[in-house]
Image (tube, grey):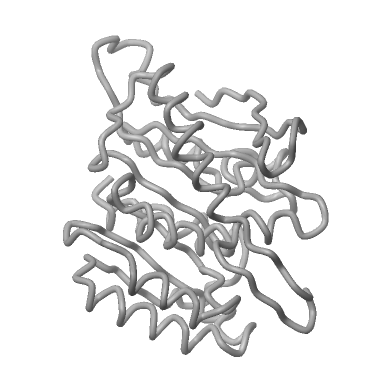
Amino acid sequence: MVKKWNVTIPKLTGDKERRAYIYLPASYEKKKDRRYPVMYMFDGHNVFFDSDATYGKSWGMNQYMVESGKELIIVAVECNHEGNGRLQEYSPINFENATLGKIRGKGRVYMNWLVGTLKPYIDANYRTLPDRLNTIIAGSSMGGLMAIYGACVYNHVFQRAASLSPSLWVSPGKMLEMIARAHIRRDTCIYMDYGSEEMFNHAANAEALISTSHLLLTKRVNLAFRIVPGGTHSEASWEKQIPIFMDCLGL
């Protein structure tokens, strides 16, 4: 079952509302004494329903969860669709390139809202397991970048992360510095992948993937990194990776 409601992120978009989604396992209403792990995902409009997805194709997480019978709550919030709003709130760093111009990263503001406002709301209103060991973060593209950021810089909140096709190209050096400074516990588990067909969409990304993977390993992260044969930068491709990253994260 997926419920929808509206939220605001005052420090990012004032009182403008955006859609939030929560998936509850079938057992949620039957087992009133049971509590569940929670996975927070980016680009909520693309997670569950094709009818809500930007390009008409979602991850189909709802269908996967029902068919797999996995016992997990999933919370996903829509991005800011206006102008460069998504790039700003899904980047923890400032960056610039010839096509996009200067982007002022507001990822820290977004993550502080997720950790300080959204998560406490979910924990207060649903039967969650709120501890770090049962809190996961996941996303793709810029959302994949934020998943790595969340798992590293907010490691006291998230033990596990799935980062699909992360946009490490935005500023590889700054991201590496951020990861190097982060206090990351050795039980941290991160899944990261990239599609073979998108590998050279951005010149800096192939090297950034290698450098980031190496740094995470030196930080003793339990890392699963793979190149997806035939993988593209699309929801259809990311949907196919769901069973793999769920298993890698022990979910």
- Relative to residue 223, is residue 57 drawn left or right? right
How many numbered circles are shown?
Answer: 0
Of residue 121 and residue 43, the one placed in the foreground of this image is 121
- Relative to residue 196, is residue 184 drawn left or right? left
Of residue 228 and residue 76, the one placed in the foreground of this image is 76
Identify the residue shown where x is 45% and y is 42%: 40
Q: Quadrant of residue 97?
A: bottom right
Identify the residue shown where x is 32% and y is 61%: 190
Identify the residue shown where x is 68% and y is 61%: 87
Specify the quadrant that holds the C terminus: top left
> Residue 125: x percent and y percent?
43, 16
Going by the picture, which residue comes out furthest to the right?
Answer: 83
> Residue 156: x percent and y percent?
29, 48
- Relative to residue 160, is residue 116 drawn left or right? right
Q: Quadrant of residue 35?
A: top left
> Residue 81: x percent and y percent?
77, 49
Question: Looking at the image, is 145 positioned above or below residue 180?
Answer: above
Identify the residue shown where x is 23% and y is 42%: 133
> Residue 107: x percent and y percent?
57, 56
